[in-house]
Amino acid sequence: MSLIALTLAVALQTSPEQEAAAALDALHAAAARADSVAWADRLAPDMVWIGNETSERWDREAFLGFAAPIFARGEGWVYAARKGGRDRHVTLAPDPCACVAWFDEVLDSQTYGTARAEGMMVRDGAEWRVLRYALSYPIPNDLADGMTTEIKAYEAATPIVDAPGEAADTPEEAAAAIVLDALHEAASKADGAVYFDLFTPDATYIGSDVTEHWSIAEFRSYAEPYFNRGRGWTYTPRSRSLTLAPLDCRCVVWFDEALDSRSYGTSRGTGVLVRGEDGRWRIALYALTFPIPNALARDMTARIRAAAAQ
């Protein structure tokens, strides 16, 4: 083979991360054209889809049932990866099978404007499918105080019941839950040493504002001045779901949790924990968001869009 041909062959190779990203694009494209068959094919058999409101948690069958009448009307929904997917990050799980990955992505919605999602994918043969998907609408920092106060008032008058999740029913999931509890305790005590020791060296932390996508070093630079002044933050878990990824190593756990905050009311954390070679579980991805109740979503997201356009 000539050098030119060899170079071309290498360039045409596609990594597992690229294949997983392409599967996400195919999922969004199928939903946009209301192609129920192609859309359903992008969902793993034991998929769970987590909607913006904490009451929304669907398994595959329930989510297909939810989507069926919408697709039947030819409507679909349009969520397109922002910047052609450059605001998407896919991470391959540490297992030789190259068959599990987690991701986060920023999306543009025709209806709601900016959206964000985190999740996990699994590879079945040559096909990547979504195993977990959590959707939210990020609230900008300069609107957060006002909007979360509105959300707290709404939830006080119209309580929202969190959808039941998946309990920690394996030793791995139970160990991961202990790490998450330790994280929240360390944050409430402003104990930066303990807090940041619970993350992997290459971890990602995503804040509630869409611009907040930090490496753990960047997040440490942001948070440590607060911790050093004894100013932590308290988020108390009220419900949590954990999923052990289908890997022989049994070393990756996905989680999503609903949290209570005195300052902001309801929030949600989603992400991934990984067990290292030393046997310790650490957080590889943590994403924080403020779920917007469905009854408020159109108004609030319209206000977010209007503020961004100014």
Image (spheres, grey):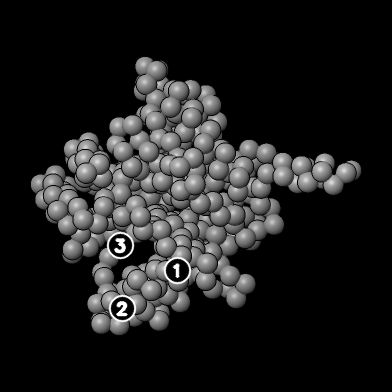
Element type at mark 2: helix
Q: Nearer the viewer, mark 2 or mark 3?
A: 2
In space, the residues marked 3 and 1 are separated at their CA atoms by 22 Å
Query: Dividing the picture into quarters, in which one does residue 229 lie?
Result: bottom left
Location of mark 2 (residue): 225
In space, the residues marked 2 and 1 are separated at their CA atoms by 15 Å
Q: Residue 237, which numbered label?
A: 3
* Residue 162 visible, this orientation: no
Q: Residue 25, which numbered label?
A: none
What percent of the width, then of the height, locates residue 74?
39, 18
Report crowding for label 1: few under 14, some 14 to 19, many 20 or more residues within 10 A (C-alpha).
many
Q: Earlier in the sequence, mark 2 or mark 3?
A: 2
Q: Quadrant of the C terminus?
A: top left
Element type at mark 1: helix
* Residue 104 visible, this orientation: yes
Location of mark 1 (residue): 216
Please name the residue shown 33% across and 31% down the image. 110
